Amino acid sequence: MSFSLKNIISIKDFSKDDINFILKQTEKLEPVARSQEMSQNMAGKILGMMFYEPSTRTRLSFETSMKRLGGGVIGFAETGASSVTKGENLADTARMVAEYADALVIRHNLEGAARYVSDIVDVPIINAGDGAGQHPTQTLLDIYTMKRVFGKIKGLNVALIGDLKYGRTVHSLSYALGMFGAKMSFVSPPELKMPQETLHDLKGAKAVTRETDNIHDVLDEVDVLYVTRIQKERFPDPEEYSRIKGAYLINSELLNGKDLIVMHPLPRVDEISPDVDDTKYGKYFEQAFYGVPVRMAILNALIKSF
Amino acid sequence: MKKPKELKVKPIKNGTVIDHITANKSLNVLKILGLPSDESKVTLAMNVQSAHMEKKDIVKIENRELASSEVDQIALIAPKATINIIRDYEIVGKGKVRLLNEIKSLLNCPNPNCISNTIEPVTGKFYVITKEPVILRCYYCERLMEEGEIESQF
């Protein structure tokens, strides 16, 4: 089993082997991520962070991953403190940071930004989210979480719930789930349905999917409820927003007696009630932790150690 | 009664004839080829009878032999077009257009939030996903582009 990619841009670039390789390495790195073992694999290496959009988990987990592997981190967490405010374009900024670092992590508000940068610099590029586009490292940690809990992905029944139109994590995730033979239900209000692009890809991959707007249609049969945030700004009418939000609220009463886990890419606002947090259902904080070993595995795969 | 004068389209001595263009699409074909220009004489026939197709367009370009890379982009809007290269009134080369797997620097991504539509020094690049109907995928933002959106750019 080996890893064929030079950059991590889109989950569509991954073969099953590539994903399996990362999952396997992630498992081995869990003790390092939990600070039970030490690694110096990235000693003397530097990771460049270019965050044009706010991020907490993704940015901190990349920093943690690099540091736990003995490496260093440079970069910016917001554009206010960089020469972007002086009007520098992305190409120039990326070329400059690439001169200082062994790999770049980019989050950008425009779709395709990471792919674009990967064509103009020589160091490996990791896409940490590009607009409404891709967020492949999130997908890998989502897949890892499911594999960790159930021991497999094939045959799992996964419901993706909430904003399936603009939520970038669900597009990448559904593609990967399709690749591994999971069955999917897409649960969303009609206004926020899975985009045609994604459905087209899934059809091509012969994935088993169905769509509904009613969460009760899926509760009894799914293994995973993957919940995403429905953003208020998507609805011009605040009353409509309240109604929709209420229809997709996950709380312990709804889950009682069901055999499933609840995942969420976070941040959550109020789509999952806090009373789910400490139950056997709530796996989202564990999922957020797996972001560290997954990203460690990615750094090790992309950056050559001394 | 006066006999109507028939306007005959003369054969060209040297150049390229693009035949079997989807009816009324020849103006878009010219745009793809960067025509009209000061150098080339061009003759157009639009919406004329065809033995193979109900109606078709024809474009004759004098003194210019089209390269296959130029020709293949025509397939985006006129998939049945045929190409004849003419030298001294003789057809010396015949071929059909074929849609390549990659389209570069010809179309813009319809997604306003795509990196290829910004101040960055980059032009549109697309992969051909299906040929009939033509569906393209933006290399950068991965958005799909269908025939209507492709045509609206010409």
Image (cartoon, grey):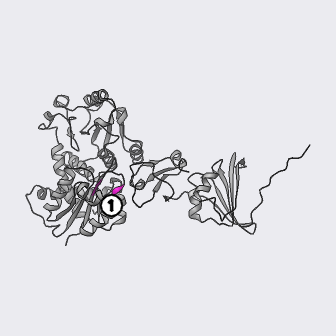
Left or right: B27 in relation to A103: right
Magenta residues, start to end: A106-113
Is residue B53 among the parts visible in the rendering? no
User: Looking at the rendering, in which quadrant would you find the N terminus of chain A?
Assistant: bottom left
Q: Is residue B115 left or right of residue A218?
A: right
> Image quarter for residue A117?
bottom left
Relative to the observer, which residue lies in front, B58 or A29? B58
SS assignment at label 1: loop
The location of residue A268, given as percent across then percent down, is: 21, 40
Instruction: Identify the residue at image location x=11%, y=38%.
Output: A278
The answer for which chain carries disc 1 is A
A186 over B34 or under it: above or below: above
Magenta span has A110? yes
Residue A106, position as x, y percentages in the image: 28, 57
Residue lying farthest to the bottom in this orientation: A306
The question of residue A109 being in magenta is answered with: yes
The residue tagged 1 is A88
Q: Is residue A281 left or right of residue B99?
A: left
Q: Mark 1 belongs to which amino acid?
A: Glu
- The x, y position of residue B59, in whole percent, is 68, 56
Q: Quadrant of the C terminus of chain A?
A: bottom left
Q: Residue furthest right?
A: B1
Residue in the picture at 28% in, 31% down: A215
Q: Is residue B72 above or below residue A150?
A: below
Q: From the top left corner, tell me how far across and down residue B19 is, in percent.
A: 68, 55
